[in-house]
Image (cartoon, coloured by chain):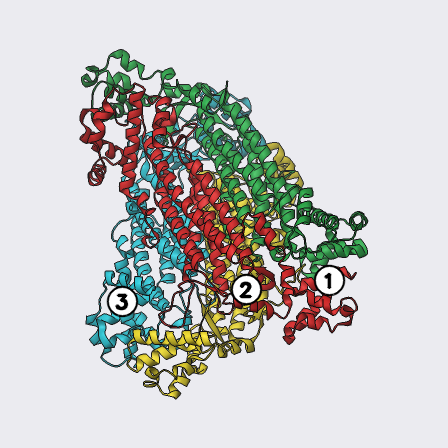
Chain colours: A cyan, B yellow, C green, D red
Amino acid sequence: MDRYALSPMRDLWTLETQYGRWLEVELAALQALESVGVVPQGTYAQLQPRVRVDVERILAMERQVGHDLVAFLWVLEEQAGAEGRWLHYGLTSSDVKDTALALVLRDAVDLLREKSAALCAELRRFAQRYRRSPMLGRTHGQWAEPTTLGLKALAWLDMMTRAHERLARARDTVAVGKLAGAVGTYAFFPPRAEELALASLGVEACVPAGQVVPRERHAEAVFAIAAMGAVVETMALEVRHLSRTEIGEVSEFRPEGSSAMPHKQNPILSERLCGLARLLRSSVGPSLENIALWNERDMSHSSVERVLLPQTFTVADFMLTRARELVAGLEVREEDMRRRITAAHGLPFSEGLLLALVRSGMSRREAHTRVRRVAMRAVAQGRDLAQLAGEDPQITDRLSAEELTRISRLPDLLREVDTSFRRMGVGD
Amino acid sequence: MDRYALSPMRDLWTLETQYGRWLEVELAALQALESVGVVPQGTYAQLQPRVRVDVERILAMERQVGHDLVAFLWVLEEQAGAEGRWLHYGLTSSDVKDTALALVLRDAVDLLREKSAALCAELRRFAQRYRRSPMLGRTHGQWAEPTTLGLKALAWLDMMTRAHERLARARDTVAVGKLAGAVGTYAFFPPRAEELALASLGVEACVPAGQVVPRERHAEAVFAIAAMGAVVETMALEVRHLSRTEIGEVSEFRPEGSSAMPHKQNPILSERLCGLARLLRSSVGPSLENIALWNERDMSHSSVERVLLPQTFTVADFMLTRARELVAGLEVREEDMRRRITAAHGLPFSEGLLLALVRSGMSRREAHTRVRRVAMRAVAQGRDLAQLAGEDPQITDRLSAEELTRISRLPDLLREVDTSFRRMGVGD
Amino acid sequence: MDRYALSPMRDLWTLETQYGRWLEVELAALQALESVGVVPQGTYAQLQPRVRVDVERILAMERQVGHDLVAFLWVLEEQAGAEGRWLHYGLTSSDVKDTALALVLRDAVDLLREKSAALCAELRRFAQRYRRSPMLGRTHGQWAEPTTLGLKALAWLDMMTRAHERLARARDTVAVGKLAGAVGTYAFFPPRAEELALASLGVEACVPAGQVVPRERHAEAVFAIAAMGAVVETMALEVRHLSRTEIGEVSEFRPEGSSAMPHKQNPILSERLCGLARLLRSSVGPSLENIALWNERDMSHSSVERVLLPQTFTVADFMLTRARELVAGLEVREEDMRRRITAAHGLPFSEGLLLALVRSGMSRREAHTRVRRVAMRAVAQGRDLAQLAGEDPQITDRLSAEELTRISRLPDLLREVDTSFRRMGVGD
Amino acid sequence: MDRYALSPMRDLWTLETQYGRWLEVELAALQALESVGVVPQGTYAQLQPRVRVDVERILAMERQVGHDLVAFLWVLEEQAGAEGRWLHYGLTSSDVKDTALALVLRDAVDLLREKSAALCAELRRFAQRYRRSPMLGRTHGQWAEPTTLGLKALAWLDMMTRAHERLARARDTVAVGKLAGAVGTYAFFPPRAEELALASLGVEACVPAGQVVPRERHAEAVFAIAAMGAVVETMALEVRHLSRTEIGEVSEFRPEGSSAMPHKQNPILSERLCGLARLLRSSVGPSLENIALWNERDMSHSSVERVLLPQTFTVADFMLTRARELVAGLEVREEDMRRRITAAHGLPFSEGLLLALVRSGMSRREAHTRVRRVAMRAVAQGRDLAQLAGEDPQITDRLSAEELTRISRLPDLLREVDTSFRRMGVGD
């Protein structure tokens, strides 16, 4: 896991940060209670300078009392003296933990959004740069019709933009806290104090409050991340395919060698990104299992979250960082890309021939059969489709030599590329 | 599967409907091509009355040519005569299949949204009805503090509302088609014709077009449905718990008996809903695996979708239908709910006692320890917490008998229930 | 789903078959009870000819009484007359359903085992046939060292053999029934009668009996199938890679064309198999969720099984059938495979050069660096590794021209292929 | 994660251990090569004392050369001097990594097996102790017929025994190494040397060798662990249910309190175990995705394994440890269990009444209807089933008062408990 943990994301998930967030919430709650008159005036001012996070002491106390938040509280009360009794007034553990988690999630999603925005910007640049760089499209691993590398990147940009927006929505969904006491009835903590405290912490109120913030909110964020991971996987998979030795149209900036075979140039960053997408994917299931709790709550979701939330966010952060590097540093062999179209025996132009025949009045089925036959011959003999078509009287009866030549004109075939860029709002 | 398939959802996923949608798309494309002058004037008018879906003929043709859409096309061309050659002009199979799928998904999501709206309305009514019906809250399966059944339902309403909104967003995400030809370059099908055709079909354009509509769109819909399933599971799980014989606070409208034990009243609808939520959950993984395709496309997603999309939507439709019936028909035993609070030896009021001691100046830790001791005694002896507290001089020194009585006043503890309803916009 | 359902597997999962199995179990139980003296002598002989499965009547009865097995039972009792009261004596629904399911699972696993054995046999033949057919090995999508197509197939055979064995174990695990009554105490159905009935049905006893057969047994079978699916996926993925236009070393027997591009030869069977592997994979999660039931049982597993068990077995059956066809019909281009090794600029022999230098006394690190440099030059200049090595004085100082030639001798590099075959017990 | 990591399992997964295992493999390979004459006599003796793991130096080297195993190797070569060039002779990185992983997995599985055996022993003791402790069985959360706590535990023992056996099998499956060089052809590393090296390391040979050990082996281990997790979940879920305040038949040895409600006794260990089972479950999907690699290998599985394997084993180790403590320390309230049967208004005996009527000649359907009616009355009026039956002339016509009394005799109903124990081989 360490291998995939970058700062500052990593630091959001340490025990120290967690306790710090708990303290922030307890203090905000205290101050708010003082504002609404539940706690005596001046309590916050007296107490605040005295309390601080003491990780070792808290862990020792937890071993003694067997409850992490109670341990945290007793340590604070030790530090605070008599006023310390007002800490946690009217609150239940989930108030503190779930609200503190919301602070972490908010910041963690913000970090991811920053990086997904940067990746989008990189993709936009990449798409612009290779907008008109022709290459063979491939479907089912087989040569299809020409496209451009820019169009490929435009599709990535589209998916990554949607991934970015899902993250933005997920932020609103998870950046909610609650300070409503056990079972969420505000029996001892007034709604007005909750409003004040959450405002000062910078999160919205979870309405209605329950004992816990509903976990269907967290699941949405985990899915948004997993879907983002699948978009990175899409790009990485394309890099792996295009950098196959036989294709060789792109390669990673810094491919990895091999301990045994000194000639190797392995696209292992792309492979790693594909693997990590599986990890993210696998987090959605338990996140959905975490939603249905017993009555006002049970704690079965807790152990899952302790492991999966840091892991999911950390891995996502790593992926977005590296994916941007992958795109920014990708080595593109435009000449080889172009050459492959030329050397493809005219196969990429078989539809053009088919449609020319259709226009000439031939039935589609007959045209399809005839062009297929010519294409199979082109492959078998290593000759050109148009040339072979020019030897078929059924075709030459209908199409002139000039018409046969025209089917392979790239500017015609790619004339609408700009339309796609314009629709996506990507300029020159 | 049949057991969980209700009409009209079921009918959206038949082979007949699929071919019907394909035909719709082919005809819309043809008409649009005619409008922009690619296809001769009058072609659509001549051709349209001649073509229709002939399931048996198409299947027979498929066995012969080994490609479902090509088979479909040859059958149409047979029906249409010479003009039939203009069908599918400039299109690739994915144009037709993905756009047709978008039509089905749009209608299927609309059906679900109708039902999730109805379920929300039912939950709103239920919440209003039991707004002030007190019952014990429970956390970790243990008695906690009082709440109301209405508050419980308010939490369901909140989650189901979010589920409904996710479905609404998913509709926009999946109701997109593309008519851009192989690899999505519009080489032979002008963008303007795509606009016209999609507008007549009532879906937006997928921008940028690729060979296929990106599968990350479909994954979002599947997740929205799975999350909705988890919300239904939440409600069903609560019904199962509250209808345990020992609890008996609610029961299903029509619980199931047993072949062996004639006295049984099993909440099997709720159990079934919990099971189906697992099914929905399990569809998210493959939907995410479906996103990263090879180059412009491969077909690995297709078999997954053929099975999972009908299943996911059909099961979701069943769940929403039955969940509404579950809520609408739920038998609630308000008297028993209330009686349980009273008979709980005052345990639900332990926090009130704790906080009263804190207010009186006792440290929280000491108050916690002392109240815990009293509570343990209450359980052991089957006596009341307040009564036992009244025998502890450390407590009676600080709290009057009247103060001890006040901790169990339900109207005090539930006084903010209306606030939660108001915040959720649920009136009387 | 129909698209992937082949007979006879499909027929095992119909409603008619299900009722037939229920009847089998009820009759076997009755006969056994008669043997041990619980039921009067002659009851079975009188009753057996009168009862039969009447699907429509049972479904109608179920609509009336709301319990599928009770409905089934009342219909049998109608048919049987007074003796019918002895049917289901001492049993609970799960006795009948779980034991009947065991019969279906046993037969379904047997079908799969037959097909996995056939696939193993096919792989064995394939491996033997191409045992010494050299081809480039590839790692990370990059050319590695030579191997043979037979070795590749040997690895598949190994994995499929293990998959087959897991299926065999799963058969023993799931082919267990129980006739022990509600909560599994044999309160009214003697253990001796269970022994007799299960023996006549051909399944083992589930020991200890509970209300239900534990679902961890079924999960093991589902995993065995999913792992088998991943093995098929491995083969299908290889076919997809090797049939890429740029590689072209194999192709499917009957690749699919395209509606738009008449030249296409798409390996869609392999793509379909890869997709179906995802489906199987996704069934493991819910199968594991199905294990932890409430107390003696709840019914949440039931809806999951109704959908997933038929689907999992049917898809697996389809995959094994088609995978065998894929292997049997695979078109292999041995000449092209061999030519690629020759045309690889000697890169596949870089380790040989490295090790020759090591043997000559050069440090591994220096040898690695030096060979890498030569290899990069070979790629850039399109020249041969050994030839370029022959121009490096640091190398020629240590290695003779003959030694440089020897590194690319295929018989040397592949001399241990037979060892691998021998170890796997695959003869000539 | 730290929270769930216990020693010595934790120590198996450190970076230091990993490098140590790599060294072990490199040395074993060297020694074997010397034995078969590939490496000069005396090399191992000279080299072995000079090399050792230097984590910091390796990490620094990796930052420089960008390949973890190459970095490891260069550091060893630095330490070893000229003889160091013979390290890794004929090997590829996967030889070292996969074989080293096999050593770790073997030890990790052994640790789990030790703990699962201990848990089985604990369950056996528990089952024996409560063999004849009657309690209400419950199905669908509703009172069913009497059973014993021992029978419940016997079912857990059965499942855990199967889980243990699956672990044992998984050990054989994953404790396999390979030293066959790139693409697994033994081109430079003789099979005989592999035999010697693997024997000295204590693992079997992976036959046939490929570039990597097939990942379907690892997936089997991960599933075995996930299934074990589901068995622990089964027990934990039962504890949670039975310790509900309303049921109160068992409680955890050391339930957790609450920060807000001093009276709470939350079964949080059981809740935690249920959560962790979800984690384990979610590891199976990516393990299955890891199986189908590209050609001889790609590296996409690696990042998944780096995260999931340590996590899966560590969590499993924690669960087995704590599950045993849970069972060993479980507080059982036998008196309350027994009292509940008595206070159940005779409902648990409804089948006995039904069957008595059947024996008397009444049709099952009529008997079922009649007993159901009596049972509903018993619930509504809080009276006893047998008593109410005694007021129904249709029943008293057929059954004597003594017969009505007999239906509730526990020794009769539980007379076969010993049979189940005997069949499971659990003595007194």
Q: Are marks 2 and 1 in contact (CB under 8 Å)?
A: no
Amino acid of disc 2: Arg
Residue linked to disc 1: D356
Q: Label 2's element?
A: helix
Pick whichever, D238 or A306, lies toward us: D238
Residue linked to disc 3: A23
Side (left or right) of B179 relative to A153: right
Q: Label 1's element?
A: helix
Mark 3 closeness class: few <14, some 14–19, many ≥20 residues within 10 Å: many
Amino acid of disc 1: Ala
Q: Position of residue A35 (x, y in %)?
A: 28, 79
Could you tell me which residue is drawn at 52 percent across and 44 percent down?
A: C220
Side (left or right) of D145 relative to A51: right
* Residue B35 visible from this viewpoint: no
Residue B404, compared with residue A26, is above or below; it is below
Residue B387, compared with residue A423, is above or below; it is below
Q: Are marks 3 and 1 in contact (CB under 8 Å)?
A: no
Camera-side mark, 3 or 1: 1
Q: Position of residue B400 (x, y in %)?
A: 36, 87
> What is the spatial separation of the Cα atoms under label 2 and label 1, in whole angstroms?
31 Å
* Residue B317 visible from this viewpoint: yes
Q: Label 3's element?
A: helix
Residue linked to disc 2: B240
Same subunit, labels 3 and 1: the answer reads: no
Q: Position of residue D146 (x, y in %)?
A: 60, 62
Q: Chain of mark 1?
A: D
Amino acid of disc 3: Leu
Residue B74, compared with residue A207, is above or below; it is above
Q: Chain of mark 2?
A: B
Tell me the number on the disc at residue C48: none
